[in-house]
Amino acid sequence: MLVGRKYRLELSAKQASLCEEFGHVCRAVWNTGLEQRRAYRRRGGWMNYAPQCKELAEAKREHEWLRGAPSHVLQQTLKDLDRACRDHGTFKVRWRSKARWSPSFRFPDAQQIQVERLGRKWGRAKLPKLGWVRFRFSRPLGGQIRSATVSFKAGRWFVSFLVDDQAATPDGHAMANTAIGVDRGVRTAAVTSDGEFFDRPFITAGERARYRRLQQRLARRKKGSTNRRKTITAMGQIMSRVSYRRGDFCAKMAAHLVSKNALVALEDLRIRSMSASASGTAREPGRQVAQKRGLNRAILDKGWHRLELALVNAARYTGTRVVKVNPAYTSQRCHACGFVTEGNRESQAVFVCKNPGCGNTDHADVNAAKNIKAAGQAVSACGDLGTGRSVKQEPGSRATGQAT
């Protein structure tokens, strides 16, 4: 099974400069390749990886700056572009902006990568054209290396090794016939049908105040200046800590859920649409923009999508099935009798069934999680009925389509 191992690099000044150069070259190759693909599509033609790779070899003979980066790194950039265009469409793939894109590049040939342990805390890796680079050996590799990706985030360089740990997904879960429903919310990150509440703050009050001051400082900095880059780096360091806490929370919660349940049911939420801006246009300005902006921040802060990815990843080791169900009326339906009305949910946390013959009371999120569990069990018994997207497939697989 393929897993990732990420470590913090300690680069020399020369190595850091080379990494930055490699990242800029890969960005230029990505943008040039994307523009070429779009030009071909406008004329009704097609451009794929093979001809672009051939043209890259010809361009390297004419432009010396292209020869600065390893050849297979640039070829891997074109492969990633080809996959992105196949999955999302040529005109939906984004440009890599110099101001907003963080440099990253991948070494796909495992035979050119060597890793040695120097001590309890440190190791080193030999990468093409970079030589031996030191990194903080915070955890064992645990398998055979397939590739290595070098990336930059919040003023630091990292290396991520793709490792094959030789593990296999079990045919079935150790605790068969167990199931749980998970309701994701903005007040509490996740609530289960068993009545468990999972939540934690990801940013401290001090970090929030400091980030606010940095935002104000950024507004006064001149674009392109050194001080502006320093301010952006300081902001990135704060948000990277927040991101690490969120990832740790989602990973621990996912491990807890899949270890005890053979089936985990989630709502099939369109998170990107739910967190879209309500600002509108100049002709048709949006309504309640401030309220919608606060809701968007709450949705993104709770890490709904990251929890979903963590569940799918952790389920590979336990044989748990992760299914998604239609979220319609899960918060308004009474789990006990099935009566549906908007008035059942009296507040954010209180659920009282208005059916005269029922009168069931429960926490609103727990009631919703129970409905999700019941719907998930029905989907599991009858197949993926009515779900827009299914995660009941081997992680990493993707649908194939026409090249664009």
Image (spheres, rainbow, N blue to C red):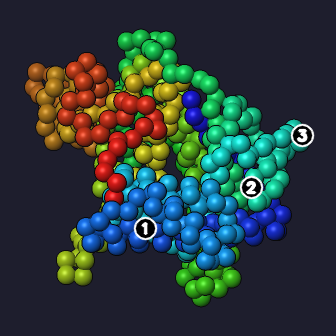
The answer for how far apart the CA atoms under marks 1 and 3 are is: 44 Å
| x then y, percent, for residue 11 | 80, 60
Give the structural element (helix, strand or loop) at label 3.
Answer: loop
The answer for how far apart the CA atoms under marks 3 and 2 are is: 23 Å
| x then y, percent, for residue 13 | 82, 68
Q: Residue at x 44, y 22 (%)?
A: 320
Any mark on residue 34, and which? Answer: 1
In contact (CB < 8 Å): disc 1 and disc 2: no
Q: Decide which of tag 1 and tag 2 comes sooner along the chain.
A: 1
Q: Which residue is drawn at 33% across and 62% down?
A: 46
Please give the count of numbered marks on the rendered protein.
3
Quarter placement of the C terminus? bottom left
* Farthest-out residue, bottom: 222
> Taking 223 as reference, is 400 above or below it?
above
In contact (CB < 8 Å): disc 3 and disc 2: no
Give the structural element (helix, strand or loop) at label 1.
Answer: helix
Q: What residue type is labelled 2?
A: Pro
Q: Residue at x 62, y 48 (%)?
A: 108
| x then y, percent, for residue 248 | 59, 41
Q: What residue type is labelled 3?
A: Gly
Q: Residue at x 56, y 72 (%)?
A: 59
Q: Name the residue under label 2.
A: 128
Give the structural element (helix, strand or loop) at label 2.
Answer: loop
Q: Name the residue under label 3.
A: 119
Which of these two is toward me, 132 or 12? 132
Q: Decide which of tag 1 and tag 3 comes sooner along the chain.
A: 1
The answer for how far apart the CA atoms under marks 1 and 2 are is: 26 Å
Q: Which amino acid does label 1 sit on?
A: Leu
